[in-house]
Amino acid sequence: MKLAQVRIMLDAEVLCGREWLDREVKSACGADLMSDVLAFTKEQGLLLTGLTNIQVIRTAEMSDLVAILFVRGKRPGPEVVEMAKNMEIPLLSTKKQMYEACGLLYRDGLAGCSLKEEHFCRQNPELN
């Protein structure tokens, strides 16, 4: 799924990185604990979060994430936006709650990013 499709689906505002909306998103992760993001996300993933601090940008860079989408209408400060621009990490914001945003993405075929989820599915194929 392209990041541009995510923007339309979640009625999201682009805070920076409009020129990178053609990037492919392979999975999504909804989290506010950056340790969980580091532990469970995959490359080319999308992070949905309510946190708006510098650590979110640093975590996204370390995890090779495609973009960050802030939920509940959250908007980071100018220093966070500037860091994201410098690191070429698109930032978007949606008024949707995290649960709803993640659900809409999952419904339209975007996979989750949890390693535990993959392990669980392999161990319990009857539930797939």
Image (tube, rainbow, N blue to C red):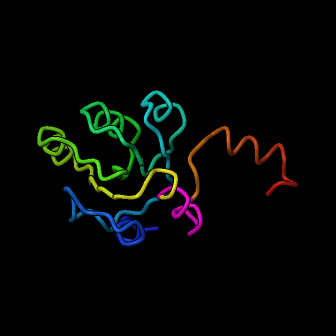
The boundaries of the magenta stretch are: 101-110
Position of residue 65 measured from the top left corner of the image (x, y, whole percent):
39, 46
Task: Kindly give the residue lying farthest to the right in the view shown.
Answer: 126
Left or right? Give the position of 82 relative to 3. Answer: left
In the picture, residue 20 is in which quadrant?
bottom left
Q: How many numbered dots are placed on residues in this image?
A: 0
* Image quarter hosting the C terminus: bottom right
Front one among 26 and 92: 92
Drawn side of residue 97 relative to residue 84, left or right:
right
Residue 41 in percent (x, y) is at 50, 41
Task: Inspect the magenta stretch and tell me whether residue 5 lies in it.
Answer: no
The x and y percentages for residue 47 are: 41, 47
**Along the line of sight, which residue is nearer the eye, 58 or 30?**
30
Q: Residue at x 56, y 47 (%)?
A: 113
Residue located at (46% from left, 32% from top): 38
**At 69% from the left edge and 45% from the top edge, which residue is drawn?**
118
**102 is within the stretch colored magenta:** yes
